[in-house]
Amino acid sequence: MSTSLELLSRHLAIPGAGMEERALRLILELGTELVGAEEGSLFVVDDQAQELVLTMTVGSATSEEALRGQRMPIGKGLTGLAVLTREVQMGSTTYSDIKQSKERDPDQTGLDPTAVVAAPLMAGENVVGAITGVSFLPDKRFTARDAERYARFASVAGVVIDQRRRLQLVSGNQGEEQELVEQRIINRLTRIIDRNPHSLEAIANLLEAVDAMMAVESLLP
C-alpha cells in the first residue's frame, strides 16, 4: 500500500515533488483563505486500493501531523463524492473516518468539521484527487460562490500536476536539457502565484485556456 508522499510524488512524476509540492501548498492556502475555511487538505487517489489518501493539510501544523496519511474510500463523504462525480460538493460532515486532531479545543470550535467544500482534482481527463476546505465554526456555511472559487483553485492545482506529468514524458525522451526547461516552467509558475496571490482565478483561467489550446493543437494534422 502506497504512502501519502509516494502517491503525491507519483502524481507529480518526480522524486520528492519539492517545487510542485510548494506550489500546491500555496494554491491550497490561498483557496482556503478565500472561502473562509480554517483548514484545507489535499487528497490523492490510490487506484490500487480505490481510496483517497490525505497528503497535505494547511491551516494547522498540528492537524497536518495528525491527518497526513489517513485514508477514506472513494465515494464516501463529500470528498469521496466529489471524486466519484467529478463535481464540487459542499455541506456538513457526512463521513467521520478521518480522525481530527485531539488538540483542538472542543469548547471553541468542536473536534469535527461543521462545514465542508470539496472540489475534484483533475489532471487532463483523469481525476487524481480532491482539495477540501473545512470550517469548525458552528454557524459557518459555504456558499455557491465559495464552491465556484474552490473549483477554480482545484483547476490550477490540476494544471500543475498535469503539466508536470506531460513534461516528464517529454524529458524522458530528450534528456537533461529538457529537464532544465521543465524546471524553468515550474519555477515561473510558482513565482507568478507568489507575486499574485489575489489573482488566482485569473491565473486559473489563463492556464485552462493554454491547456485547451494545446489540446486542440495536438489534434491538428
Image (cartoon, helix red, strand yellow):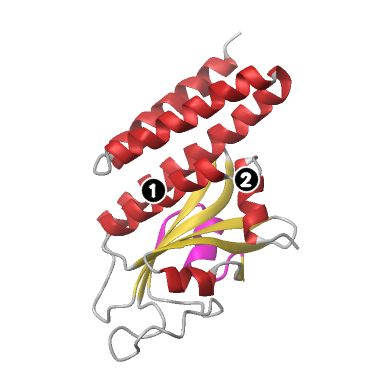
Query: Which residue carries the number 1 mark?
Result: 27
Q: CA distance from mark 1 to mark 2?
A: 17 Å
Answer few, some or many: residues within 10 Å of disc 2's Cα (few below 14, many 20 plus, some between 14 and 19): some
Pointer 2 residue: 11
Q: In the rendered structure, find residue 186 and report the number of the disc placed on it.
A: none
Q: Is residue 199 left or right of residue 15?
A: left
Q: Secondary structure at mark 2?
A: helix
- On the image, the x and y values in percent for residue 218 come to 58, 17
The residue that appears at 61% across and 35% down in the rendered structure is 165
Residue 92 image point, x, y percent: 38, 75
SS assignment at label 1: helix
Q: Nearer the viewer, residue 59 or 118?
A: 59
Q: Quadrant of residue 194?
A: top left
Outermost residue toward the bottom in this view: 107
Amino acid type at circle 1 is Ile
Please say if 109 is above or below 188: below
Q: Which residues are magenta?
A: 74-89
Rendered-image quadrant of the C terminus: top right
- Residue at 58% in and 45% down: 17
Look at the picture and state if 102 lies above or below 54: below
**Residue at point 67%, 54% (across, down):** 6
